[in-house]
Image: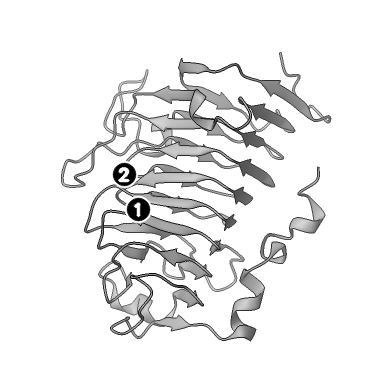
Amino acid sequence: MVPHDNADRLKIHILPGVYSEKVRIPASKPYISLIGDPNQASATVITWHDKASDKGNDGSELGTENSASVAVESDYFCASWITFQAINSVVDPAIEGHQAVALRIAGDKSMFYNARFLGSQDTLLDEYGTHYFLHCFIQGSVDFIFGFARSLYRECTISVLASPYAITAHGRGSASDNTGYSFVNCTVSGNGPVYLGRAWGEYSRVIFSYTDFDINIFPQGWSDWGVPSRDNTVVFGEYQCEGKGANRRGRVDYSKALSDLEATPYIDFEFISGALWLRL
């Protein structure tokens, strides 16, 4: 048992296997590390079958947030060499209520190393807090990295299951919110064409730097979610990316090819104030 208000790092080693269960780590239990079998993230799988339209104990629909196979609400969480899976998701967003979250992270100062996130629509709910994803594999089809957090994704593989949807949907709601997603030295592969992101929030912020777009990207690159007023407020940027989807000819006017100076705040740990917490 992990005590409430735990103040010391607690490492939980999980043996290889498929664990079919719904997991929730409450805010009162910080400093937990889940560690799978080193070098075999695919060997340790936590999976569940809920979807947004399923009914909870009170008879109401779960909704996307509560469909999560694993929900982490505590701070200083760490996971390595583990696969988080949602098995009830479908590729076609026209089928309502089938959003299924593999992992919801709502705690602050959390890190994921060599973790895998498998699903389709709404795979990874990177909801609130400051997070670091290193050497992770993230699979999905529709808005499958989404939320309101401030997160750095470094050297991750983003695998797109189906076209013609979007990879990210960030919900930043005001110019004063210090949130957004930054992808650095990542690879985007799979089935295109896709959009790099959609403006879920009025001030949505997503940046791709030094990323290999090994997939066709729609020439427009980005979507304002059908709300033209967001064209003046979103922050969508690309910096020194490569691959067949990196040609910015045809990009929407409200996205930007960043200069060296403009890209600097997004490409290192400073974006997530990592020097203050990553070793805790």
Residue 1 placement, left or right of 114: right
Which part of the image, by quadrant, shows the N terminus?
top right
SS at mark 2 in the image: loop
The quarter of the picture where residue 191 lies is bottom left
Q: Residue type at mark 1?
A: Asp
Q: Residues within 10 Å of mark 1 (few under 14, many from 20)?
A: many
Q: Which residue is mark 1?
A: 143
Residue shown at the point (16%, 41%) measured from the top left: 95
Residue 95 placement, left or right of 69: left
Toward the right, the furthest residue is 8
Residue shown at the point (43%, 35%) measured from the top left: 102
Q: Nearer the viewer, residue 28 or 12?
A: 12
Residue 131 placement, left or right of 158: right
Q: Residues within 10 Å of mark 2 (few under 14, many from 20)?
A: many
- What percent of the width, then of the height, locates residue 87? 33, 28
The circle on residue 200 is none
- What percent of the width, then of the height, locates residue 96? 20, 41
Q: Which residue is mark 2?
A: 121
SS at mark 1 in the image: loop
- What percent of the width, then of the height, locates residue 65? 42, 38
Confirm whether residue 91 shows in the render: yes
Q: How is the image coloured?
A: one colour
For residue 188, above or below residue 244: above
